[in-house]
Amino acid sequence: MSEYLILGIVLIVVLWFFNRERIKNRFFTPKQRNYTIDDQFNSDKREREKEIDKLLGKMGKNGINDLSAKDRKRLDELSRK
């Protein structure tokens, strides 16, 4: 019986060792990934570009008439930045 207990403990330790990064990322998520002002600026820029691409894709099918007034206003705001 004690051999199975030792084998079980060794198995748990080995599994923990090989999965420690996954466990760490799941239970201890990093709170902020942007470390410098440049990283924050680039992250914000990518988010704006994604939103612009989404709005332009929506507009691409039938022209500007596809966009609602709210979408047009948001596209104007993003294009000014």
Image: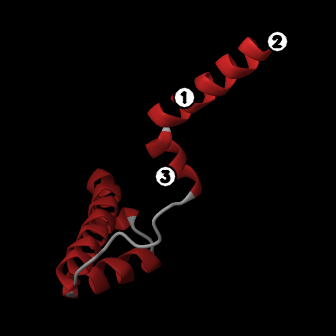
Q: Residue furthest front?
A: 2
| Residue at 17 percent of width and 80 percent of height | 38
Q: Is residue 65 above or below residue 26?
A: below
Q: Do the residues bearing badges 1 and 3 touch, measured as CB atoms within 8 Å?
A: no
Specify whether 35 is left or right of 68: left
Residue 65 or 55: which is nearer the viewer? 55
Mark number for residue 15? 1
| Residue at 37 percent of width and 83 percent of height | 73
Q: Do the residues bearing badges 1 and 2 touch, measured as CB atoms within 8 Å?
A: no
Could you give the CA–CA distance between mark 2 and mark 3, rounded to whole angstroms? 35 Å
Number of numbered discs overlaid on the protein picture: 3
Mark 3 = which residue? 25
| Residue at 45 percent of width and 79 percent of height | 70
Residue 27 or 56: which is nearer the viewer? 27
Identity of the amino acid at label 2?
A: Met
Which quarter shows the N terminus? Answer: top right
Mark 2 = which residue? 1
Q: Is residue 53 above or below residue 72?
A: above
Q: Secondary structure at mark 2?
A: loop
Estimate how packed mark 1 is, as few (under 14), some (14 to 19) or many (20 or more) residues with alpha carbons within 10 Å. Answer: few
Could you give the CA–CA distance between mark 1 and mark 2, rounded to whole angstroms? 21 Å
Specify whether 5 is left or right of 10: right
Where residue 47 appears, x then y in whole percent?
31, 69
Identity of the amino acid at label 1?
A: Leu
User: Closer to us: mark 1 or mark 2?
Assistant: 2
Q: Earlier in the sequence, mark 2 or mark 3?
A: 2
Q: Secondary structure at mark 3?
A: helix
